[in-house]
Amino acid sequence: MPKLIINKLGPVETCELECSQFMNFTGFQASGKSTIAKAIYYFRTIKDDIIELAKSQALDATPVYGAKSTLSIEHGITLRKALENYLREKFLRTFGSSWGMPNDMYMEYHFTKTCYVKISLENDSRYSTPNYIWITMSNELIRFLKANNHTLSVTPLGISEEDLRIFKKNLYEIFEDSCSVVYIPAGRSMITLLSQQLSYIYATMDDMQKRSLDTCTKDYLERILRLKPEFSEGLQGLAYSSGRSGLSPRLVAQALDLTQKILRGTYRYSNGEEQIVLEDGKYVKINFSSSGQQECVWILNLLFYYLVQQKEILFIIEEPESHLFPESQKYITELIALVNNCGHSIVLTTHSPYVLGTLNNLLYAKTISPQARKEANKIIRESLWLDYNAFDSWFVKNGTIENCMDADIHMIQNEKIDEISKVINEDFERLLELQTTNEESVVF
């Protein structure tokens, strides 16, 4: 199982965890949940970085009109050196300047027993900047980069598809990972609010301004700009295309139903504007919709889009509950569980006891005895049940993480869900006791 290790990065003092198919992080604000999520994103997208750098290297050697890669590369540089340079830049754009970080900061990700990448800092006069970002890679990965330096051939139409297919196959075998990563950050409503102006704003930004965006936000922004036209017929149009993908119509219908319950309408991209279509056929422009709709619409769109595409995805979703009524928080958690059970992986950060409570119900449903499963399915559909063995929940606090799964009952510990409720109830009981005591003193 892949393993993430972090030491003194941002608010996270120490963290070591094995990465399961569904990971949930909860805890106080500024405790480090997003830092851990971004670290997972940073490492899990390295294989995609290698692919784009290899394509850039090939096109740099043999330019083809109209063909380009998403990453630029220094002329004549080796693939290994290009990756090291890019990972330094990517670190700075994901976590900020290394100057203020402790010298013993490091983070590493073990994809397999023989494949890992480690990021650390070097404070040495040989380097032009303090806290120079140092990249360490496993021998297996280094051998791959050397063996595949300038390995992609170029045709008049661009990169050879057969070469690229073989390159990806060999790379995925080393990482034992073929997942694409979709990061959905917090603070989504502002991007949604500026939806009509977004394409213009982004098009007028130069490369330096685009690089000033953090990697996760830039990836999210470019993804929604790229995918908007896919929703010209709404989610129903995407659902129709799923008939050719082999995905069960029952699962598609269930996902559509949950999406409509959460959004209280359906999404459509029409005539260059984003719309929420209501039950009566009327629509509201997305920038005039509710804050809850603005926050959740692209979570729903991305989950549904990749569900029907049936391409294996790791979704990293920050605070899906934002601005949603508790009932809608339940539904969006169930939709995430449905997507997870269709072969996708999930990393979830949340503050919400309603999200945690829903996850617990889905975990508990899976433990129901076989004799009662038919009745349990009437309460919670079996397609939503979560497998304890593929699920982990972590509480992030005071720079460390604590596994908050109860091994005996195979659920999230209730005290973690209700931790703040206890404080609120204690305050109420003290006030009630004070009021009672005061009334008694007045009587006598």
Image (cartoon, helix red, strand yellow):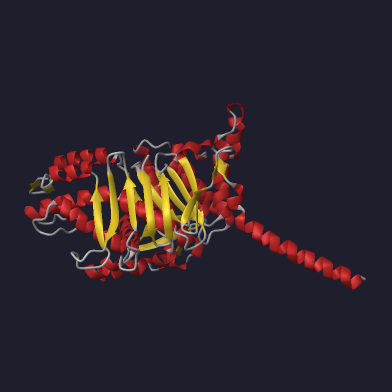
Task: Judge by depth and name the residue closer to the eye, 96 or 376.
Answer: 96
Rendering coords of residue 122 (x, y %): 26, 60
* Residue 74 in sight in this render: yes
Where is residue 119 shown, x and y percent of the image? 29, 55
Residue located 48% across and 44% down the image: 392
Viewed as shown, does residue 413 lie left or right of 199?
right
Answer left or right for 282 relative to 59.
Answer: right
**Would you identify the image quadrant in which residue 352 lies?**
bottom right
Residue 395 appears at what percent x and percent y? 51, 52
**Image quarter (top left, top right, bottom left or bottom right) of the N terminus:** top left
Image position of 352 with respect to 409: above or below: below
Q: Quadrant of residue 68?
A: bottom left
Of 18 and 156, the residue lying toward us: 18
Q: Position of residue 375 (x, y in %)?
A: 62, 32
Q: Residue at x 45, y 51 (%)?
A: 348
Q: Nearer the viewer, residue 295 or 366?
A: 366
Q: Quadrant of the C terminus?
A: bottom right
Can see residue 290? no
